[in-house]
Amino acid sequence: MSPPSAIHVLPETDTSTFTIPDRLTLETIAKRRAASGKLVAGIAAAADVEQLKGRSSHAHKPLAKSWEHRFTAESKGRTGSSLKQAAKFLKTPGLISLGGGLPSSEYFPFEEVGFKSPVPGGVLRVSGTDGDADGNENGGVPLQDVVAGKHDMAEGKSDFDITTAFQYGQGHGAVQLLRWMVEHTELVHDPPYRDWSCTMTVGSTSAFDMLLRMFTKPGDWVLSEEFTFPAAQETAAPMGVRFAGVGMDEHGIRAEALDEVLASWDVKARGGPKPFLLYTVPTGQNPTGATQPLARRRAVYAVAQKHDLLILEDEPYYFLQMPPYDPSSPSNTTTSTPPSHKTFLATLVPSYLSLDRDGRVCRLDSFSKVIAPGTRCGWLTAPAALCARYATHADLSTQGPSGATQLLLFKLLEDTWGHAGYLDWLLHIRAEYTARREAILAACARYLPPDLVTWTPPMAGMFQWLRVHHRLHPDFLKGEKAAEEIEEAIFLRNVEEGTLLMKGSWFRAEREDEVHEVFFRATFAAAPAGQIEEAIRRFGVAVRGVFGVRGGDEEVGR
Amino acid sequence: MSPPSAIHVLPETDTSTFTIPDRLTLETIAKRRAASGKLVAGIAAAADVEQLKGRSSHAHKPLAKSWEHRFTAESKGRTGSSLKQAAKFLKTPGLISLGGGLPSSEYFPFEEVGFKSPVPGGVLRVSGTDGDADGNENGGVPLQDVVAGKHDMAEGKSDFDITTAFQYGQGHGAVQLLRWMVEHTELVHDPPYRDWSCTMTVGSTSAFDMLLRMFTKPGDWVLSEEFTFPAAQETAAPMGVRFAGVGMDEHGIRAEALDEVLASWDVKARGGPKPFLLYTVPTGQNPTGATQPLARRRAVYAVAQKHDLLILEDEPYYFLQMPPYDPSSPSNTTTSTPPSHKTFLATLVPSYLSLDRDGRVCRLDSFSKVIAPGTRCGWLTAPAALCARYATHADLSTQGPSGATQLLLFKLLEDTWGHAGYLDWLLHIRAEYTARREAILAACARYLPPDLVTWTPPMAGMFQWLRVHHRLHPDFLKGEKAAEEIEEAIFLRNVEEGTLLMKGSWFRAEREDEVHEVFFRATFAAAPAGQIEEAIRRFGVAVRGVFGVRGGDEEVGR
C-alpha cells in the first residue's frame, strides 16, 4: 500500500489570491473572480491552473503521489515543442514577431458566430408542461440569442472571441473555458489533495487512447467491470492491452473481487504484469446501469490503495443521477427536483475524485450526455504532473478541442449560463431522464414475464440491464442449447418482432470466455416514452416466443 | 521498384451514376449532383466514398498498390466496433431501437447555430480597396447571415443540421461535408488511380500522429527535408521514430539526395531499417518557403517508385501559391488574380496526389491556413484501404472532427459558398498573401545587407527563409566562433532590437548534427505590412551589429 505523500507547504508567492478556507460555492466563485480581476489570455495562452484554482484554499491538503515510474518511454520522451523556446521572448516590450506562422484572423471567414439556447433557469420552470409557452420555438422553453464577435476581446465585450478561439491554441485548451471547468470541478468534487489540475480532451474515447499510450505497453492488462464499455476495450486491444474483468453486483464492481483478481494475479498465466490501471464507470455504468454507492467506492478505493492502482474514472452519466425508484409513486419533475443547487450537489454520490487523498484518480468528464456528443470536448482531472504530460501529448496530436466548440461552450457555460445556469440545465436533463426511466420500468413491469426476465432499477444514466434466466429454457435444461445460443435466439427473435436491444455478451471485458449469463441492454435515452413501451412489449413477446411459453401478446406482472 | 498494379475492371453494379468521361469541373459536379439526387445521410451514417466520387469516371484507372505489408500490428489489430454488428438490423422496417446509447437531440441546448461570412465572390470584388463599402462590418467585404437549425433535415431545409452534426458521428466525419471534400479533391487533383478515397482528420498534426502509429515502430526512420516542420519531428521522436534529413535546394527536397540516402542506407549505423515513409511539404515548405516545381516532383516520385516509398504530402500552404516575384513590378490584386477558376486551378503546381498512378501518396489537406486553425478539421486522401484503416483508428480515438466545426464548415463551403465560392475565397487569400510577400521582399531588399544575407523569393506559403553568410564573420574566420554561436548571437541581438525571427537550427531534421549553415525564418502571415517592414529593418540592424559592420540603421540594396 502506498501511503499518501507527506504534507508539503509550498511557498505562497501570490498573496493577492482571495482566501477561501471552506469548500467552494457558487457565491465564493463569484468572490474569487472579483478578487482576481479580469481574465487576460491572448492567442494560445498557456494556462496556470493553480492560479485558476485559487490556491490558498488547497494549501492544507497533501500533495499527490508521483506516477513518474509508471509513464511509458513515449510519454517520458515528450519534451515539448522546440519553437516554444521562442515564446519567452514574446513578452519583450515593443517586440514585432515574425516568428510564429499564425495566419491573421483577418482571413478567418467568420465575422460572428452565434446560437440560440435555453434561458438559464427557464428550462426548469417550464419543463414538464405542455406548450403553454408564449411563441417560443422549443416546445415552451424560452430561448435567447448568444453571439460571439471576431474582436470581442479587443473591444472589451467578452474574455473570448473568434480571433482567439479560431486561432491555433494549446493542447490543454483555452484558459477561458478551462477556468470554467476547473471551477466546476472544485465546486462539485473539491479534490482532497493539493496539486490536482485539469486539461481538456477531445472526448473521453480519445482521452482513454492517450492515457493508454501514457501508461501501457503491449502485453499489459487493464482492470475493468466484467461487463464494460466495448469502445474502451476495443481502444486497448490493438495496442496489445487486454481487459481483465472484475466481478460485479447491482452496485457495480465488487471490491473483494478486485482485491482477489490482484492478489491472485498470475503473471505467467496472464502473460503480463499485474495491472495498475482500473478503468471504471462508477455511475450509471454502461452497460449494466449500476451506480456504485459511497460505501462501495470507499471499499474500491481502499483496494486501489492496497495495490497502488491508478483509477480511470469515466463519468459521462454522473449528472444523470436519479431519485430511488418507487413503483407505487413514480417520480415527476416536481418530486425529483432538489429544491436548491446546494441540495442537488449534496444528493450526488461522491465521485472517486472527491475521495482521492492520494492523487490516484484520473477523472474523465464529458459533455456528450448533457450538452451534445458532437462537441468533442471534455476534460480530465488528475495530479498536475499527469495533466501536464497529457497536455504535452495533446500539443502534438489533437492540439486540443476544436476552437469552434470551445467558443460555443464558453459562450454557453461562461458568458450565458454561468455555473448556476449549468446546474439548472443538469437538473432539467436529470428530470427528463428520470421520466424516461419511469417509463421503461413501468413497461418492463407490465410486459416482461417476471420469472424469465429480472432487473434492478437504474439510479443513473440511460441504460436498463435485463437478465434473462436462460437456465429455465427447456433446451438448456436438456443440455441442447448453451447460454450464448439462447441469447442469440432472443436477439434475432426480438429483431423479428421489430425491436433492437444489445446482447449482453457484446459487453464482456474478456470476450474469449464462455457466456455464462444472458443479459440484454436497453437504453431509455434515444426513443420517446411511447416507443419505449412498445419496444419492451415486443421484447416480452420475443422472450416468451423463444422460451415457448404462452401469453405472447399479453400484459403481465401488474 | 514496384510497378503499378494491373488494371482491374470491377463489376459496375450501380448503373445510375452519371457518366463523366473527362476530368471533373465545376459544371460536371453540378450535373453529377443532379443525377445522383438528394443526399440522405442520417445520424452517424457510414460514407460510401466510391458513390460520392461518381465511380464511372475512374473506371479506366489502375488500382492502388497495397500497403498491407507495411501496417503495424496495432493497425492490423483494429477490427472495428463490435456494437456496429447491430447496425445492419437498424434498416428493418418498423424497428424501434433501444440499442445505441445516443442522447436525444431534444437535450442539445443549441436550437440554432449561425454565423456571418463573406459573400462568395464579394471578397474578390472589394479586396484591395479601402473601406468603400456600404455599412458592412468587415472593412468593405459584404457579409451574409448563415443559419443552421436543429431539424433542418427533417424540415427539408438542408442536408445537414444540429440534430445530426451534434450527435455521435463516424471517425471519417459526416458524409455531408466529406462529399464536398471528395469533390474538391477530384476537382483540384483528379488522382490518376481508381480506388482513392478521403477521410477526415482533426488536423494534420493529429493525422501525422495516427499515420506514424499505423506505419512505424520504435527504431524506425522517416525521411524528410533537411529543414522540416519541428512539430512533425517532435510528434515522431517520443515514439522512438527519427527523422532522416534529405538535402534541399531552392526547389525543395532534391531527388538525387533522396536516392542517395536510400541507396546508401546503413541499417547498422542508423540502427533502423531502410525507411519507406517520406514526409514532405512540397509547397511553400515550412521553414524554407521552397515550392517544388513539377519537374522536381516527378523526379522525387520516380525515386519513391524505385525505393517503394509512401509519400506523406502535407499541404497546408498549397493554395497560397503566388505569381513569380518581379521586383520591378510587384504583384497587385489585379495582376496576381487569374481571370477564371479554371485558369486558377491550371496555375497550381500539380500535387503529388495528381501524379500518383501507384497509390503511394497520402495527402493531408488542412483548413488551418485558408479558413482557420481552430476548425481542427482537415482531410486525408489516399488509397481506400489506407483511409479505411485510418477511419477505424479515428472511430476509437478522436471520433472525427467536432460536430460544431463540421456544421460550420458545411454551412460555409457547401450551403453558402459552394466549390466556386471557395475558389473565390482562395483567390482572395492568395492575393492578400501575395501583397504581404511583396512587402517583406521589398523590405529585405531595402534593409538587409546583401553581402551578409541572401534569400529566394517564396512562390507560396507564408515564410521567407533568410540565409546569413556566417563565414564572413570575423570570429568565424579566426576560428573563434562556430556557426551556431553566430546564429545565437544574431537571434538575441534581434530580440534586443525588438524583433523575433526563428533560428534555422530549430528546424533541422537531425538535431544532433552540427550547425553548418545559418538561417532565419520570417513569416509574413502574422504582422501587417508596416510592421513587417520595421521588423526586417531591425533584423538588418541586428545582423550588421553582430558582424560589426557599419550602416546599422540605413537603407541598403536599393
Image (cartoon, coloured by chain):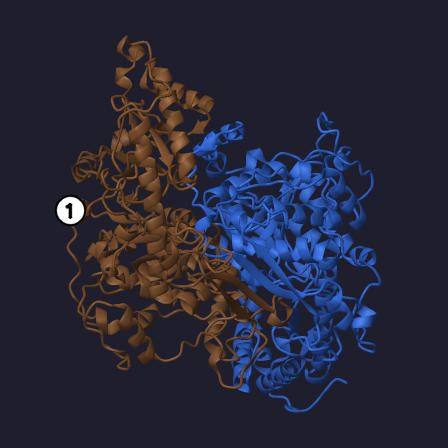
Chain colours: A brown, B blue
Residue A410: horizontal and vertical position, in percent? 44, 65
Relative to residue A289, is residue B151 drawn left or right? right
- Residue in the picture at 18% in, 44% down: A296
Q: Where residue B98 appears, x then y in whole percent?
A: 41, 34
10 Å neighbourhood of mark 1: few (<14), some, or many (≥20)? few
| Residue lying at 68% horizontally and 62% vertically, measured from the top left | B284
Tally the marks.
1
Secondary element at tag 1: helix
Would residue A151 be found to the left or right of residue A183 on screen?
right
- Residue A193 is left or right of residue B539, and the answer is left
Image quarter of the C terminus of chain A: top left
Q: Amino acid at mark 1?
A: Ala
Q: Which chain is indicated by disc 1?
A: A
In this rendering, the answer to whether B456 lies above or below B388 is below
Residue B187, compared with residue A222, is above or below; it is: below
Determine which quarter of the picture holds residue B245. Answer: bottom right
Q: Position of residue A438 (x, y in %)?
A: 31, 40
Return the residue nearer the eye: B444 or B209.
B209
Residue B3 visible from this viewpoint: yes
Can residue B287 be seen here? The reply is: no
Residue B233, how many percent across, how many down? Answer: 52, 57
Between B152 and B179, the one lying in front of the other is B152
Q: A47 or A422, which is in the foreground?
A: A422
Query: Which residue in the structure is indicated by mark 1?
Result: A295
